[in-house]
Amino acid sequence: MIWFSALLQKAILAAAGITGKKFALVAGSSLVATTGILAAGMTNSSNDNGLLAALLSRNLAANQAPAPVAAVEEPEEEVEETGGEHEPASHESEASSPETPSEPATVSEEPSEEPEEEAPLPEEEAVPGPIQHVFVVNLASSGYDEAFGTTPQMPYLSGTLRPQGSVLTNYELLDEATSANSIAAISGQRPNAATRANCPTNDNFPSNATANKAGFVSGDGCIYPVATLSLGDQLSSSQLKWKAYMESMVDETGAPANCVYPEPGTAEVPVTGGYSVTLNPFTRFHSLLDLGDCSANDVPLTELDKDLKKLETTANLSYISPNLCNAGVAGQCPAGAPQGAAAADAFLAQVAPKILESPAYKKDGLLIVSFSQVSPPAVDPVTGIAAPAPAEPLKVGTLVISRYASPGGTDGTRYDPYSMLRSIEDLFQLSHLAGAAPSKVHSFAPALLGENGGD
């Protein structure tokens, strides 16, 4: 196989610079994952082979020491799925225009089963574009009006940040659950029964789960098989850097730790207002767990300040998640502290200025303030009465800030988590994964870059 020969040659050349204990870690931790990848490569289509080859070689090429944390499941023969997916509705882009009312489209939870065009093989090195540092801050939504309406509950977001960028007024979630949306936004995988329930147990997919031609993995589960790629895999294999910053992420001793998640098949012990694996989609992929990317790149939020100080230490993609309280999830903050939308706004007021003043943002940056879950209505502590739920809970909106975004502008195109993935892939010249692949999934990258079209 040509792809395997090229992979082997690249791995041998990269390994020449890795010696001693580090080489042993690379070889030992990659053995099981490599077996699964090779098995998938033998059975999948030729288009998949390039993706799997890049996945296998990227850690050696980047001279990283993996830290395996979970076993892999060897994919079996591909099982074709049928039905259940619908392409998102097409809307005209209104980027960089004054805000105008627009009819929200009905959210289509699952895009077309078949991508309308074959995705190209991943590049060994991405072609640099004008935006090379993307910062994504994910919060919990109390409703579009609470964030961007006429009487918002997030004064820093609406009063300080919004005038600096453009609001995606028709950005809608696929589901109310964090896991369903955040996984879709970094891999294009559609929600399933487990992720819609926010993964009460951290289960692997069944051993017979396979990806269909559109890239969707069959069955229900929370930890995807090793051959299922994520945005992190794409960036690493393109020699780009990514980091996920998780507030309050600690190990069982209470010490800050990287890539924290429950063992497969077990439930997370909830900590009120603290870190939750539901906020950390990068722990849901064996491709990142077994080849060491999660251990290396999924870090506590306390690392962000240090990394922002210099251009060379700032990742191309920085994914930032506050803890449950600061994300704005109702009922998660201590009594007397800001709650819900107010807590999320206070977090933004702390972290956003650091990003906007960083050398990387000033050079070629994009800040995305988005929402990956629906917060339950807040309960009045005196009366015990819950606030009314938003009329359109899945319509959350998103703010994009960059020198390429029109200050105070709006974009009424229909977007969703698949669009988030497609847009970031477009900015870094990457191919499109699973739900981000159909051409009717809109990307906001062209509007930022002054290009025509909405996808």
Image (spheres, grey):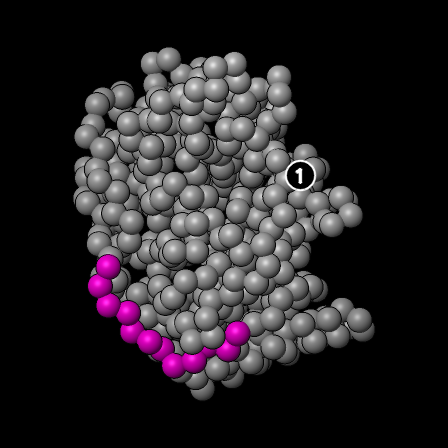
Left or right: where does residue 325 sit relative to residue 416? right
Say what secondary structure mark 1 lies in.
loop
Left or right: where does residue 91 sit relative to residue 434? left
Query: What residue appears at the point 77 percent right and 45 percent down from the top-left corner?
Result: 255
| Residue 343: x %, y % from top left | 55, 24
Give the residue pinned by disc 1: 248
- Is residue 260 a member of the stretch shown in magenta? no
Question: Residue 208, relative to residue 385: is it above or below?
Answer: below
Q: For the view shown, which residue lies furthest in the front direction?
A: 383
Query: What residue appears at the point 28 percent right and 53 percent down from the top-left corner?
Result: 110
| Residue 102: x %, y % from top left | 20, 28
Is residue 199 in view? Answer: yes
Query: What residue appears at the point 75 percent right and 75 percent down from the top-left corner?
Result: 24
| Residue 184: x %, y % from top left | 40, 51
How many other residues sit within 10 Å of disc 1, few (<14), some (14-19) or many (≥20)? many
Question: Residue 405, relative to residue 289: is it above or below?
Answer: above
Give the overall secondary structure of the magenta segment: loop
- The N terminus lies in which quarter of the figure? bottom left
> Which region of the structure is painted magenta?
73-84
